[in-house]
Amino acid sequence: MKILMIMTSNFHQSGITNVVLNYYHSLIENYDCEVDFVVPNKIDEKFIKNNRLENAHFFVMPRKMRILCTPLYIRKLKKIIKIGQYDVVHAHGSSSLLFFELYSAKLAGVKVRIAHSHSVKTEHPFFHKLLTKPFMKVYTKAIACSVEAGNWLFKNNNFEIITNGFDIRRFKYDENFRNKIRDKYSIKDNEVLLGHVGLFNETKNQIFLVKILDNLCKKNKNYKLLLVGDGILKENVIKYVDEKGLKDKVIFFGTTNKPEDVYSAMDIFLLPSKFEGLGIVAVEAQISGLPCIISNSVPHIVAINKNVKFLNIENSDISLWCDNIEKIDKDDLRENNDISFYKEYDIDNCHSKLYKIYVEELKK
């Protein structure tokens, strides 16, 4: 089976990319599948090597072409699909602009055209509204990572939910990794390490975390903040940390291929996102046994255990976040966390669902 995965957001170290990479490896390792990618950005050799993508073909189609040069974009994409003779075109995105990719696939004669919703918002609301009706006519199967993401993109039409699958065993708490990272960054046993994983952008709302830390440190100096990730607003956050005099309290960890290690180092996980299609990092954190405080804008389906609190993210709510953080006992045993509760997110379960969809759609 030949599958073309189309990414409409940059293919780099991010949540959606990690989900797609998990499916890629599962499909080629467990089934007779060949998977290629259409991506909007050039992929460097280091990323390909680190993520074991040497056997995949990459076709770069810049995002700006979708709107500024739509006829050319569709022609080029149709040609790629036709030459590749793909059985399935699986397009990942968060708006009805997926029409362009799926219409190209339809013109190329592809029988199975999948629209996969990963979020609940778009950067292009005007075009999203304009293309909603034609979009609904070009896909043959609708998939979403959550009810919220499905309702956002597919409205009242049917869709199937496949949660963002990953190897849940990787994220079980590890005392050795905890000690290694805390020693590296000189984090004392009596210090509480708040943690966050995500791109530095408006959506992930890292500035809110710095405000929380600033508030906490006015009463108790034993708090530190670990920020994992990279992105366009990272320098803004660094500058804000300096302005608040918190340089020795915030650790900018950068990107990592092993987020499971940093979860083990944390004491409390915070996710103040302005919106999320799912918020898979919250599930990863729970598997590691972390208490989590999460924005009310994140789908509540991510709360697998009782150690999760949802709060609003207005500036007036910062004191409430601080109060809840201060109530958490960081010395609760994490080794006893039963990961069988998280099997819904196990990649073995999720990739079998996805492959079954491919097979059933091809039989129609």
Image (spheres, rainbow, N blue to C red):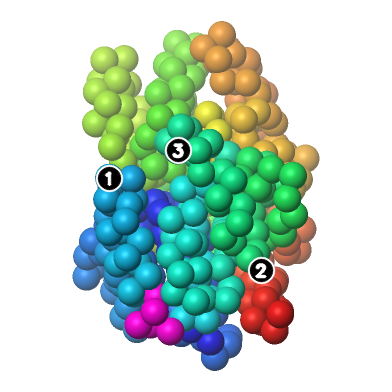
Q: Where is residue 118 in the image (x, y as percent from the top left)?
A: 55, 50
Residue annotated with mark 3: 127
> Residue at 46% across / 48% down in the picture?
97
Question: Badge 3: how crowded within 10 Å, few (<14), some, or many (20+)?
Answer: some
Nearer to us: label 3 or label 2: 3
Q: Can residue 283 be seen?
A: no
Q: In this view, does 237 lie to the left or right of 217?
A: left
Q: Give the camera-side residue of 132 and 297.
A: 132
Bounds of the magenta segment? 81-85
Pick whichever, 210 or 189, lies toward us.
210
Q: Is residue 93 visible?
A: yes
Q: Badges 1 and 2: C-beta atoms under 8 Å apart?
A: no
Residue 37 in the magenta stretch? The answer is no
Q: Do the residues labelled 3 and 2 touch (CB within 8 Å)?
A: no
How far separated are the C-alphas under marks 1 and 2? 36 Å
What number is the disc on residue 350? 2
- The residue beneath circle 1 is 68
The mark that comes first in sequence, 1 or 2, is 1
Q: Residues within 10 Å of mark 1 (few under 14, many from 20)?
A: few
Which amino acid, mark 1?
A: Leu
* Mark nearer the N terminus (3 vs 2): 3
> Please, what secondary structure does the residue beneath circle 3 have?
helix
Alpha-carbon span between mark 3 and mark 1: 12 Å
Decide which of 264, 197 is in the foreground and name it. Answer: 197
Is the residue 303 above or below the residue 38 in the image?
above
